[in-house]
Image (spheres, rainbow, N blue to C red):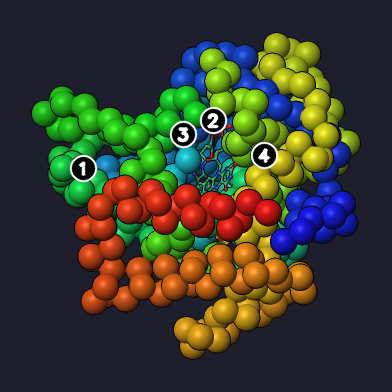
Amino acid sequence: MKFDADTAHRAMGPIDQAYLGYAAEEAVRTGAASGGVVTALLLHLLDEGEIDGALVVKIRCENGRIDGRAVLATTREEILAARTSKYFDVPVVREGIRLIRAFPGRVAAVTLPCHATALRNLAISGPEIAARLRYVITLFCNHSCDRYLLDKVLQKNSVDQSQVVEFFFRRGRWRGQMQGKLRNGRKFCFPFSRFSYYHNFHLFSLTRCLRCHDHMGYASDFSAGDAWLEEMKHEPIKHSIIFSRHSAGTAVLQRMAAAGRLVANEIDRTTVFRSQKRAINYHYNVTARSRAAAKYGMHIHDSVGAPVRWNDDLAARLILLNHHWSHDPSRRDWISKIPQPLVMAYFLFLKLLQNF
Ligand SMILES: Cc1cc2nc3c(=O)[nH]c(=O)nc-3n(C[C@H](O)[C@H](O)[C@H](O)COP(=O)(O)OP(=O)(O)OC[C@H]3O[C@@H](n4cnc5c(N)ncnc54)[C@H](O)[C@@H]3O)c2cc1C
Ligand code: SF4
């Protein structure tokens, strides 16, 4: 999709001020998904007394299974324990609403864009939620996956999930590593790309993501994501992008920087867009997916009316095909048996289609 300023604005929503940076504290960055800015922001809000708790997602390894649970963290240790991204579906809204209702204080909720919209809608109809929901922080999100992908990737990398006692989807520099620990004390670690190649071309992606074009959380106060910028590739410290949607949010980020918690430079909207160009090119163009959907007996409402060029059309068709195959019980198993070099070649082709 050819982007002009107007389309970029519609795709990203209003941005008051954006920053490129990282959490100043190394202890916060270690173990974060990217530059640790989301965790640093939560700790700052807690220390400043702006919130009493944070709705975050924690990994639980119980009953032989890795799961994600929403928790209300009220201490630094609990917020730190919930760092890094969980790339599967977590019932953040269902569990979050129950937790917020039972909590007597003010809350900052970390969510994906779809969760943010749902929480805001629930806050409109529930005054007790509105009174407690102080801030909504969204993660940039291209799509999320069925847990089947994690199960298969662990299996393919000879990790017995029933023995896992600690697990991190992604830690470390640039694309990062998938890491964990087994009951016998042995640690495992392999490139996150062994998961992300499948994830990135939407194999096993959630069906609701095909209909979504909200990449940065229109309903958020703050939004954060990875700085996929060529010039950041060799930076020794991994950087994130974080922006505020209103001046009160910008004041929070400025106080955070002044307090020495955030190391960041102001960036413009073009840099924010550039950092997510491929993802937004695909994600915003629901029109292309709407047209391709009929071939798979699906209906996707075209909520954006975007122009569709040949590369948008081909990318949408391939992604719908990937989604269709990977949700078919008779075919999904053999997808994980495709040799890695072939997966990588397919991934690079799709990346090329989404690049312009
Ligand atoms: C499904 C998914 C898709 C994403 N897609 C993109 C993308 O296309 N482009 C991009 O730039 N970034 C994407 N991200 C965001 C990225 O992975 C980082 O989370 C982001 O850069 C913030 O990094 P950080 O170091 O500041 O976060 P951290 O300091 O590590 O904090 C992350 C916070 O997010 C919370 N969290 C983790 N997973 C979830 C979840 N599933 N639902 C709700 N809260 C959660 C954690 O509890 C923690 O509080 C995605 C994240 C997820 C979970
Ligand atoms: S792509 Fe949209 S629907 Fe899917 S997880 Fe992300 S925000 Fe939610």
Is residue 204 visible to us here? Answer: yes
Q: Label 4: which residue?
A: 275
Q: Is mark 2 within 8 Å of ligand 1?
A: yes
Q: What's the distance in space between the residues labelled 1 and 3, CA to CA?
A: 18 Å
Ranked by sequence position, the earlier of labels 4 and 3 is 3
Q: Is residue 249 above or below residue 112?
A: above
The dot on residue 34 is 2
Is residue 107 visible to us here? Answer: no
Q: Label 1: which residue?
A: 157
Identify which residue, 217 or 189, lies in the foreground.
Answer: 189
Ranked by sequence position, the earlier of labels 4 and 2 is 2
The percent coordinates of residue 255 (x first, y second) are: 79, 20
Q: Label 3: which residue?
A: 175
Quadrant the N terminus occupies: bottom right
Q: What's the distance in space between the residues labelled 4 and 1, CA to CA?
A: 30 Å
Identify which residue, 133 or 210, lies in the foreground.
Answer: 210
Q: Is mark 4 within 8 Å of ligand 1?
A: yes
Ranked by sequence position, the earlier of labels 2 and 1 is 2
Question: SS class of the residue under badge 3?
Answer: loop
